[in-house]
């Protein structure tokens, strides 16, 4: 990857997910890599930073995460919406979803799971084993061990989108997405 990424302080990594975007979850184990689209992820804690993620027990991603104990959350932008929809509609057991959707992986720094080129931000995560939650609810708790952002869209702890194609996206259903809107500030309430 030629573009320089901005390191995001782990204490601020929750800001990369706090606005509720769809994520691309990448995983790898035993030389087999996969990617899935997931809307059910969220920040959980600050220090150490943690996230929650739902991974259905029937998926290849679940098999790889169970075996490796790690995954990456990639925050795609509007430019990648068709590819997000594609990986959400394909089975990794039947094809190489990276190749099929035209996604380009690149190496993470702290985990084996690849990161995905063209995203707005990336969180490298290690699972905190909670077998009861994982088996009963498909709910994973993970510690964020590295966080990155494209400084063109996230810097100084804030999202700012220079163009619509770089806005993060939110999946509704049936192939419909929303894009993140403009930021605005509310004046302090007078007392």
Image (spheres, rainbow, N blue to C red):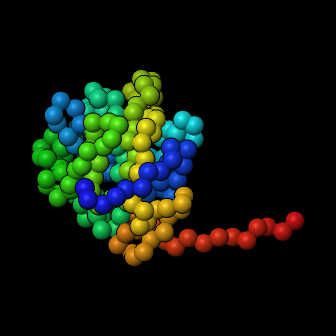
Residue 170 against residue 60 in the figure, above or below: below
Residue 51 against residue 20 in the figure, above or below: above
Instruction: Give the quadrant of the N terminus.
Output: bottom left
Residue at (26% x, 31% y) in the render? 63
From the viewer's perspective, tell me whether residue 84 is left or right of residue 164.
Answer: left
Say if residue 114 shows up in the picture.
yes
Instruction: Give the quadrant of the C terminus.
Output: bottom right
Q: Residue furthest bottom?
A: 163
Residue at (22% x, 43% y) in the render? 34
From the viewer's perspective, tell me whether residue 176 is left or right of residue 141.
Answer: left
Q: Position of residue 54 (x, y in %)?
A: 40, 40
Residue at (54% x, 35% y) in the render? 48
Q: Position of residue 27 (x, y in %)?
A: 27, 39
Residue 29 against residue 86 in the figure, above or below: above
From the viewer's perspective, tell me whether residue 152 is left or right of residue 174.
Answer: right
Among the 4 quarters of the image, the one containing residue 66: top left
Q: Position of residue 184 (x, y in %)?
A: 60, 72
Residue at (30% x, 60% y) in the render? 3
Q: How many marks?
A: 0
Q: Residue furthest right?
A: 191
Say if residue 88 shows up in the picture.
no
């Amino acid at each position: 990857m030629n573009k320089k990424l901005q390191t995001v302080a782990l204490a601020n990594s929750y800001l990369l997910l706090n606005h509720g975007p769809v994520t691309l979850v990448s995983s790898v184990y035993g030389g087999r890599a996969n990617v899935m689209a997931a809307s059910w992820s969220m920040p959980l804690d600050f220090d150490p930073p943690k996230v929650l993620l739902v991974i259905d027990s029937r998926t290849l991603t679940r098999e790889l995460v169970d075996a490796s104990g790690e995954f990456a959350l990639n925050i795609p932008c509007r430019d990648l919406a068709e590819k997000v929809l594609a990986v959400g509609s394909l089975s990794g057991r039947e094809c190489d979803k990276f190749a099929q959707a035209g996604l380009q992986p690149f190496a993470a720094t702290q985990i084996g799971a690849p990161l995905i080129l063209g995203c707005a931000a990336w969180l490298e995560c290690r699972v905190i084993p909670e077998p009861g939650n994982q088996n009963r609810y498909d709910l994973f708790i993970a510690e964020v061990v590295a966080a990155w952002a494209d400084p063109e869209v996230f810097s100084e702890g804030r999202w700012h989108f220079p163009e619509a194609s770089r806005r993060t996206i939110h999946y509704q259903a049936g192939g419909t997405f929303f894009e993140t809107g403009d930021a605005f500030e509310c004046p302090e309430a007078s007392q």
